[in-house]
Amino acid sequence: MSEAPTTTLRRTPLADLHEQLGGRMVPFAGWSMPVQYKGIVEEHRAVRERAGVFDVSHMGRLFVVGAAAEALLRRAVTYDVATIAEGHGHYTLLCNDEGGIIDDPYVYRLDSQRFLFVGNASNGDRDAERVQSFVAPGDDVDLLDRQEQTVMLAVQGPAASGHMARIIGPEVAAIEKRACTELPYLQYKLFVSRTGYTGEDGFEIVTSVEAGRAIWRQLMAAGVEPCGLGARDTLRLEAALPLWGHDIDETTNPYEAGLGWVVSLDDGAEFAGRDALARIKANGVDRKLACIKAAGRGVIRDGFPIMHDGQQVSIVASGSHSPTLNTSIAMAYLPKALSKYGTELAIDVRGKMLPAVVGRRPFVPHAGDNVAST
Amino acid sequence: MPTPDDRRYSKEHEWLKADGDEGSIGITEYAQEQLGDIVYVDLPEAGSSVAQFEKMGEIESVKAVSELFSPAGGEVTASNAALVEKPELVNTDPYGEGWLIRIKTGDTAEADKLMSAADYDAFVQGLG
């Protein structure tokens, strides 16, 4: 079990607390992060059934502030940020000029002139440079990278709301899905949103290091399960939420990834990748990101060949074990004709053929959704 | 969990417990702890043969797959059927209900190439 030297890895302001809790620290996107504390399955179940907290301080946090903030973001991302009301957020994409996905940030609007752009850890600097590249001379806008100075926590699960209300205040429970607000905590200020990447109800918090550590300690005292990257991955995979670098990247476009709903082509805005995306939409895609479920025992993992009628038709983008379904699940790009529900496949698991079938998206319904979205 | 001294251990973190001319084989507490949640175990079938320190199967946790190396050679007489439905037994009881296979042991000298519980503990300590 070799690990990269930790000296070169960045540590979040909570790293010492993770180590005290017995968190197994692993290198991830240049950071030393806990992959698990008690165990992935136990942490996964805690989030599905009760509440868990993740230190997501490794994620990029860029405040975009100024009279030109909205216009700048509209040039950079695929979603029409003008339609994001104050105190709300939306999933967006940062695309290259060919329509490939550079990152899949969440953009929150605090008020008319302040936005928070949350990107993946692995893309932090690139995201900031990309957004900066759309600043025109004289624009009244500042990009404030607050990753170093702040902590970001994700408190997720059906009991998250109750815990948050007790620790921060009853107003937390009133925050609507995908909404955000600023609240006081002791003498500190919190950014709190009702978002997350687990498929469960939950919150994300951005605040000072001091307040972040205090809230973490309060959550621990309340019995909220500390959760690592391992459970974060199995939870998001069950929810069929794409992971950048696995399910989406610059070689994939939003339409084949099933993310056409975050591309706003009708507001006339000239955003990065718009022409390419309009063309891709008009022409249609020939492959789709599909949800695949094992129909036998074994674990499907990233990169495994996918077979149909004896021919390799794709490779696995993301694969793991689903603690909720107690079987292996995966996402992969399949030729459109094979991406339909019920298509029988075989996954080449180190030379052995594991039968699998195209399932519905998501594997596990998102909390609050009565009908699984497609 | 103390390392039981009624069996012998390999550097690959498997144990061999002799019982007459048969032996049962499993993985150690250290190994299950390192692997994390075990979700699938691929074991040799009864009637097949395994060789000492050679690959005998695979064990998959949520995170990763690892190869299993047999601590002794011989003919497989049984594999633990309970692990098909409950692979987590390897996590919860690696020295008991979470055993992997039983074999008809051949070369008794093979056990000499394995470590005692005390030596294995020292070996694991050395891994840091």
Image (spheres, helix red, strand yellow):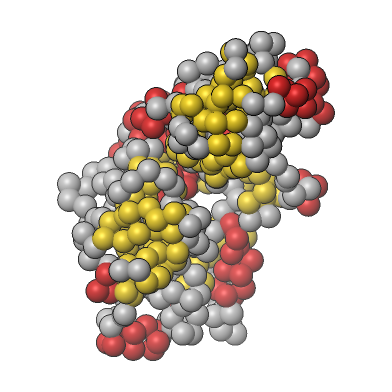
Give whichever of A95, A42 is nearer the camera: A42
Give whichever of B8, B121 is nearer the camera: B8
The answer to which image quadrant residue B28 occupies is top right
Residue for point 22% across, 66% down = A340
Residue for point 23% across, 44% down = A368
Image quadrant occupied by the N terminus of chain A: top right
How many numbered marks does the figure carry?
Answer: 0
- Give the x, y percent position of residue A26: 66, 44
Q: Is residue B11 visible?
A: yes
- Give the x, y percent position of residue A75: 45, 79
- Give the x, y percent position of residue A161: 35, 33
Residue for point 39% across, 32% down = B84
Residue for point 31% across, 61% down = A345
Give whichever of A249, A149 is nearer the camera: A249
Q: Is residue A213 visible?
A: no
The answer to which image quadrant residue A107 occupies is bottom left
The answer to which image quadrant residue A141 occupies is bottom right
Q: Is residue A76 above or below residue B110?
A: below
Image quadrant occupied by the C terminus of chain A: bottom left
Q: Is residue B116 above or below residue A216?
A: above
Q: Is residue A132 above or below residue B4?
A: below
Q: Say whether residue A176 is left or right of residue A197.
A: left
Give whichever of B116, B30 is nearer the camera: B116
- Give the x, y percent position of residue A276: 40, 87
